[in-house]
Image (spheres, rainbow, N blue to C red):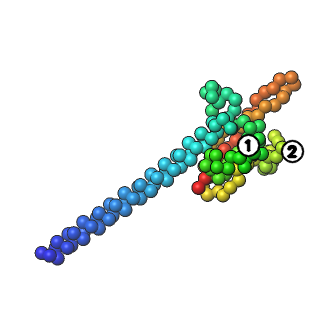
């Protein structure tokens, strides 16, 4: 009788450990999904922040629109914003129309592809597609020239 009680107790303990391991695995999976979702929200929030957004972003006429001229100024003053957003790396990569894979400087802007604002350790990178717009003169008019880009953010 004692042997049977020990066997039944051991059986239920093993079943409990098995169920607990499945629950922990599901919890880890949902935690990583939540972390990825938060990172994607961070990328969208960053694209719509006043430091990056195009002029009409707060009128809800342009969302996920990055002003390339503002991004170049931020690149020049990136040491001020090191801990402002809580990210390690911010990079904007122009996708279409594609030119050479040159990093943007004030000498080759706008004929470049990569605007690297913060350059830190890259652990996990999250990205979102955005419009990269800049002002361009066309005769006597000033127009918005927009291109497709990818905003990439990584943090620890």
In three-dimensional space, the C-alpha distance between marks 1 and 2, rounded to whole angstroms, equals: 16 Å
Q: Secondary structure at mark 1?
A: helix
- Compared to residue 40, the image places residue 136 above or below, namely above
- SS for tag 2? loop
User: Pointer 2: residues within 10 angstroms few (<14), some, or many (20+)?
Assistant: few
At x 60%, y 53%, the residue is 155
Left or right placement of residue 81 versus residue 76 in this view: left
Relative to 104, say whether 12 is above or below: below
User: Which residue is depicted at the point 45% across and 55% down?
Assistant: 29
Labelled disc at residue 107: 2
Looking at the image, residue 21 lies above or below residue 145? below
Residue lying farthest to the bottom in this orientation? 3
Residue 113 in view (yes/no): no
- Residue closest to the eye, 59 or 130: 59
Q: Quadrant of the N terminus?
A: bottom left
Residue 44: image location, x then y, percent: 60, 40
Q: What residue is shown with label 1? A: 74
The relative height of residue 15 versus residue 146 in the rendered view (above or below) is: below
Q: From where the camera sits, is residue 59 visible? A: yes
Residue 82 point in image, percent of width and height: 67, 50
């Amino acid at each position: 009788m004692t042997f049977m009680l020990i066997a039944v107790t051991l059986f239920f303990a093993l079943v409990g450990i098995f169920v607990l391991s499945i629950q922990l695995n599901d919890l880890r999976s949902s935690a990583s999904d939540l972390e990825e979702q938060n990172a994607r929200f961070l990328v969208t929030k960053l694209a719509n922040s006043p430091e990056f957004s195009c002029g009409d972003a707060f009128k809800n006429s342009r969302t996920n629109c990055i002003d390339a001229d503002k991004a170049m100024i931020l690149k020049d003053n990136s040491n001020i914003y090191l801990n402002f957003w809580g990210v390690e790396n911010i990079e904007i990569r122009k996708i279409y129309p594609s030119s050479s894979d040159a990093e943007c400087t004030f000498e080759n802007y706008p004929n470049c592809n990569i605007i690297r604002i913060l350059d830190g350790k890259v652990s996990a990178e999250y990205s979102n597609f955005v419009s990269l717009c800049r002002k361009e003169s066309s005769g006597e008019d000033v127009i918005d020239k927009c291109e497709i880009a990818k905003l990439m953010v990584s943090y620890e």
